[in-house]
Image: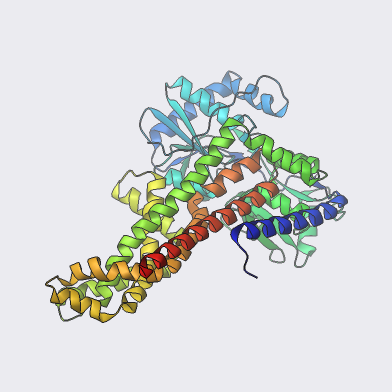
Amino acid sequence: MKFNYINKIIVFLLVLATAISLASCAENNNSVIKMIDIKLTNEDYAYLCKKGNTALVTSMNSFLAQIKENGELDSIIAKYFEGEGEKQGYPVSTEGVENTPGNLIVVTNCPFSPFEYMETDGKIYGIDIEIAAAYAEAHGLELIIKNIGFDEIFVQVEAGYADIGMAGITADAERAKIYDFTIPYYEASQKLVVSAQNTDFDECKTVDDVQNVLSSLEGAKAGYQSATTGALYINGDKGWGFEGFKNIDGKAYATAQVAVSDLVNGNLYAVIVDEAPAISIVNAANATSGLNWGAKFENFFSTISNEHYLSVFLLGLINTIKVAIVGLLIGIIIGTLIAIVKVAPKYKLIYKILDKICSLYTVIFRGTPIVAQLLIAYYVIMPSLKIEVEALTVGMLVFGMNSGAYVSEIMRGGLNSVDKGQLEAGRALGLTYSSTMIQIVVPQAVKNILPTLGNEFISLIKETSVLSFIAVYDLYKALLDVGMVKYDSMVPYLMMGLIYIVLVLIISAGIKLLERRFAKSDRH
């Protein structure tokens, strides 16, 4: 039986409903977690600046010293740890911004409460955020806040896309070799989060006791947020003085929140995370662990109904579609030109040289992952050439160039499928080789490869999820932000999968319509 697209959507929704029902039954165990109240490390938080940016570091140091002396820093910290005073939220930038002298561009990473976190009003709050706002006001600067991945903070600052990184960043001699840091503003530590049923640490009194338990484990899995001190602590780093635990299988996550979710699901033995955000994450996980799926969906829709998160979602959806469409168009142009060169007779030197160049091009773009191409283009090539281009534009160009390498092979097959008599007829009419290919052969080849081009478009739609690596708000990043508000990403992830499937079904339906249209024109 042949299913139409409506049937496919209905089947998917039934499968999804079944999975949710099963998950709801499994949820009755009310799995909860707890934090082991023993400090594993002693760290100092400071703000991150580009190496050599002495003016900003000196200015920020002077400001930090001033608010320490007048008690303003203590007031801000007390506001978030003890609830003393009114908290101030600020908007988060979702568009590309220019790094000009009149702006203070701050990159941070949520959720990392109480230092930076987002609320349902769409604003970002926290100790770091209020310090940044106070500094910007004192120096007459416009504060621009970008919420990105923690590991991306370092490359954004180093590449000059941001002035300062504020995200509970630990200042250390190893990092100071590459970046400049301000004076410390907060003393922090790492702590262990485990299942509430875990009794292995009940008798532990000191950090040595905890480490002895960890060392005795075999094959246990420990989660941490990538690029953080927790990762170095578990895996070991001589520069930081951490021996690590060879018996423990470390597992990196984009955020500590996601790592803790995996702990709640029973896939991890423990999670190591900074003490202050650990308290918020544990409280949130325990509060949401007993929620049924109805309440989880209610949380999701109440958040996304907010004007800010709805606009962020729509922006992410539009950016996803925009990058895929523009990428495919660029890919078709590049791919067609490469294919024409590859099928051209090699009796002229120019065609031999172009063939070698095109072969190198396809090897580079087909031989490397698109996320590597994005990172190299945005964080290496553009800053090196001192070219100021928005991340979204870079994404379109890279996706287009990547697609061109694959479309070239698709188009080459299409060109070879066209009867050679078509080319000979064009040449007999006095057309040049290029004109014959573009006006006669290529249009016929496109009809032959239309289904394969549709598959390429579908691939581009799904691959756009890596755009967040260069701080572009795509569908993945937008829904991730929605999940951060309630510390629950399960429903946003389900909705993300559903939306991608709907997009794919729409594209597939469109390709089918085009195929029928071409088939009808052929009959006439």
Which of 408 and 164 lies nearest the eye of the viewer?
408
Q: Residue at x 34, y 62 (%)?
A: 332
Which of 404 and 223 lies nearest the eye of the viewer?
404
Image position of 135 (left or right of 331): right
Residue 330 on image: x %, y %: 34, 57
Q: Quadrant of the N terminus?
A: bottom right
Which of 137 and 182 lies nearest the eye of the viewer?
137
Image position of 478 (left or right of 297): left
> Against 400, is 147 above or below?
above
Residue 294 on image: x %, y %: 78, 43
Q: Residue at x 42, y 65 (%)?
A: 453
Protein image colouring = rainbow
> Against 261, is 82 above or below?
above
Q: Is residue 111 visible to the viewer in this orientation of the structure?
A: no
Residue 63 on image: x %, y %: 49, 25
Residue 99, quarter of the rendered image: top left
> Against 518, is 232 above or below?
above
Residue 216, quarter of the rendered image: bottom right
Q: Is residue 152 visible to the viewer in this orientation of the structure?
A: yes
Q: Residue furthest left?
A: 430
